[in-house]
Amino acid sequence: MTRIERLAGDGNLQLALLEGRRFPGLLIQGDSLKNLLDDLMEEAPDSVAAERLSEWVGAYEAMMRDAGLRLPYPGGSQP
């Protein structure tokens, strides 16, 4: 099992270092990620950023489904 070390945090955002990685990553709560995508889709639905964020939300939803977990927001794919 890969270990994750929490380095710092501020509300829905956490700085974490995945074992074996040189640089830490930013952990974002799933519902916050989905809210960001919804906001971006209203402002710039055809942007590269919206496309990338949509891919991330899709990956999040797939991982949640594969883990047998419910999404923290309505819609999307459910287990």
Image (cartoon, helix red, strand yellow):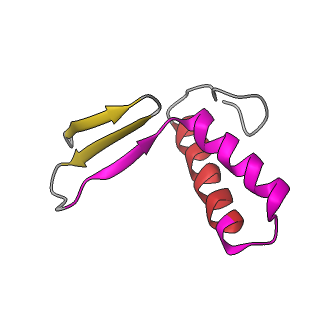
**Which image quadrant is residue 46 in?**
bottom right
Judge left or right: residue 77 versus residue 55: right
Picture quarter with the C terminus:
top right
Judge left or right: residue 5 versus residue 79: left
Q: Residue at x 25, y 53 (%)?
A: 24
Judge left or right: residue 3 versus residue 36: left
In the image, the segment drawn in magenta is 23-49
Q: How many numbered circles are shown?
A: 0
Where is residue 35 drawn, in percent x and y? Answer: 69, 40
Front-most of 73 and 8?
8
Q: Is residue 51 magenta?
A: no
Q: Residue at x 53, y 43 (%)?
A: 63
Where is residue 12 drawn, in percent x and y? Answer: 47, 32
Q: Residue at x 59, y 44 (%)?
A: 33
Does residue 20 sit above or below 64 in this rendering?
Answer: below
Where is residue 31 drawn, in percent x and y? Answer: 62, 33
Where is residue 38 drawn, in percent x and y? Answer: 76, 47
Front-most of 57 and 65?
57
Judge left or right: residue 3 versus residue 71: left
Q: Residue at x 17, y 49 (%)?
A: 19
